[in-house]
Amino acid sequence: MGRWEPGAAGRLRVAAMELYAERGFDRTTVAEIADRAGVTARTFFRHFADKREVLFGGSEQLEEHLVAALAAAPADASPMAAVTAAVLASADYFADLPREDARRRAAVIASTPELRERELIKMASLTTALAGALRDRGVEPAVAALAAETGVGVFKVAFERWIAAPDDVPIGDVIRATLQDFSALTA
Amino acid sequence: MGRWEPGAAGRLRVAAMELYAERGFDRTTVAEIADRAGVTARTFFRHFADKREVLFGGSEQLEEHLVAALAAAPADASPMAAVTAAVLASADYFADLPREDARRRAAVIASTPELRERELIKMASLTTALAGALRDRGVEPAVAALAAETGVGVFKVAFERWIAAPDDVPIGDVIRATLQDFSALTA
DNA sequence: CAGCCTCATGTCACTCGATGACATCAGGCT
DNA sequence: AGCCTGATGTCATCGAGTGACATGAGGCTG
């Protein structure tokens, strides 16, 4: 594994992000991304299932991380309490990610319906995973689905708030504030 | 407007639904759908933006209906109460839709990630619309987003339950039961 | 009634995303 | 030295989606 410049996947990710930001997702061809990364278009599709997937690298790890946090909650915790633990656990996942990177990525995704679709299905996958983890704890399916749906909803809102917040506001604070707002909402 | 068989859009919708159900979304070409509907592929794209959109006809009306219901809630109703009114209003939107049709459509969508993506973005659009309607009532943006996110989550779960329920269980009952489960969850 | 206009559709040509089949070649292994 | 492996390049092809232009029935106007 060394004949070519290593790290093709990483170069493709960087090139794609740059080009999507520069001229927009639709006005960027896979061939252009591949060129900038020094490979062919065929190689692009060997690393990423499609033109969108190149922007959604770490989503599986996030999912695993939150599921693990949910599973680690005390056995006698209520469904909402377990989900809350999972949402809070997202903080340390994003802790080391420069907020400016997150902003740029979010801006690109927000500007293209196709990319928004892809992000939404990642969130849906997260919802399904959390619901499954809840059922594993003995929570009734319908209740598990509701709790997962709710938790991911809170996560989405919190993430958007974090993007929009000043750089000195830590993500944990944003999440806790959002959870508090949610409590007030349903009180 | 009468030289050709009228109702091309409707015929295309029927043909697409049939073919997607018969052989799957990916193994169906737009040319085949158009053939069955008696038009050309070019005409398909004059009626529908892309191959998926043909399955998501009434989603704008649903959105308008729920937004109207939310707006019609008493001015002093809480955000969650207003959202609850909107979710309940979906009942009369689906009242006249044969449940078997809904089941078939849901099965096709569930079997194809691409179609799930499209459905998710319709739900996201609904979320945005409800949040906007809440802000119009003077609800704070972050709270509006949370309430809308929550309401659509409940709607999703209720709709799935309705699909799975026996034919003699009215949709209103399913929605009310889901709302009750949600209350219990956050109590 | 002739001529014109409109507008949904057909036809043609083209770009680009995505995939399968096969070739290539550096490095490791026997 | 010869073989195997795995990432990549090359070639061919399908299908989605779009722009430009042609066509022809029905309605409208003079």
Image: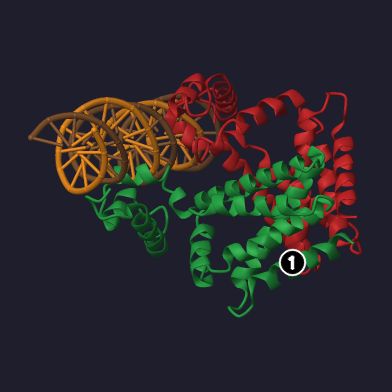
Chain colours: A green, B red, C orange, D brown
In the visual, does B16 lie left or right of B67? left
Would you name the residue on which mark 1 appears? A178
Q: Is residue A180 visible?
A: yes
Where, by quadrant of the figure, is residue A165 drawn?
A: bottom right
Quadrant including the N terminus of chain B = top right
**For residue B77, side relative to residue C30 (left or right):** right
Q: Is residue A79 above or below residue C10?
A: below
Q: In this view of the protein, which residue sits in the foreground, A129 or B171?
A: A129
Left or right of C30 in this view: A102: right
> Which sits in the foreground, D2 or D5?
D2
Q: Which residue of the protein is positioned furthest toward the bottom in this rendering?
A: A168
Q: Percent x, y for residue B57?
A: 63, 37
| Vertical arrangement, residue A168 with respect to residue B48, above or below | below
At horizontal 85% and vertical 57% (from top left) the residue drawn is: B80
Quarter-wise, where is residue A171 in the image?
Answer: bottom right
Q: Nearer the viewer, residue B58 or A109?
A: A109
Provide the secondary structure element on which disc 1 rests: helix
How many residues crowd around disc 1 within 10 Å: few (fewer than 14), some, or many (20 or more)? many
Above/below status of A154 relative to A168: above
Q: Position of residue A89 (x, y in %)?
A: 67, 61
User: Residue A50, image x and y in percent?
Assistant: 42, 44
Image location of residue A146, percent across then percent down: 78, 46
Residue drawn at (82%, 28%), measured in percent from left and top?
A: B165
Residue nearer the viewer, A140 or B90: A140
Identify which residue is drawn at 60% across, 28% down. Answer: B10
Rendered view: B118 above or below A88: above
Number of marks in picture: 1
Q: Chain of mark 1?
A: A
What residue type is disc 1 on? Thr
For the C terminus of chain B, the quadrant is bottom right
